Amino acid sequence: MKSKTTLRKYLHELKAIDAVESRTGRNPRNPLRSQTVYRIHELPRKTYEGPLSLGEFYTSFNSGSDTPALG
């Protein structure tokens, strides 16, 4: 990644679709520093209605619709 701002942009998008959760706390080895722990969800939430694979995404994208449904 180029910078923290680039990473934050991607993390914001992943959090918006509930693909990632993050928790910030103190580093147990050095309590003066903070650390962020990320939890990655491999499956989408039950209410997600968008494509479940890259193949489904490209199929909906190439079907002529303006934008593919991403949930």
Image (spheres, rainbow, N blue to C red):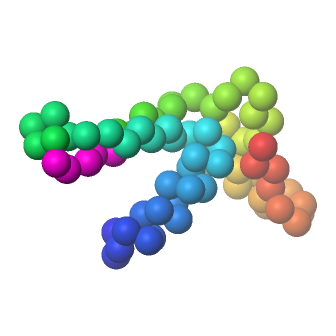
Residue at 41% x, 38% y is 23
Q: Residue furthest front?
A: 32
Q: Residue furthest top?
A: 46
x, y percent for residue 11: 50, 55
Res. 55 visible in picture: no
Q: Residue furthest left?
A: 29
Q: Is residue 27 left or right of residue 53?
A: left
Residue closer to the observer: 9 or 44: 9
* Corner quadrant of residue 29: top left
- Magenta stretch prevailing secondary structure: strand
Tell me the quarter of the image containing the C terminus: top right
Q: Is residue 10 magenta?
A: no
x, y percent for residue 39: 42, 34
Image vertical order of residue 4 relative to residue 68, above or below: below
x, y percent for residue 55: 65, 46
The region drawn magenta spans: 32-36
Residue at 51% x, 32% y is 41
Q: Is residue 53 left or right of residue 26?
A: right
x, y percent for residue 28: 16, 34
Residue closer to the observer: 31 or 41: 31
Residue closer to the observer: 70 or 60: 70
Tell me the quarter of the image containing the N terminus: bottom left
Image vertical order of residue 21 relative to residue 9, above or below: above
Image vertical order of residue 13 relative to residue 30, above or below: below
Residue at 56% x, 40% y is 19
Q: Is residue 24 left or right of residue 41?
A: left
Q: How many marks?
A: 0
Image vertical order of residue 30 relative to residue 59, above or below: above
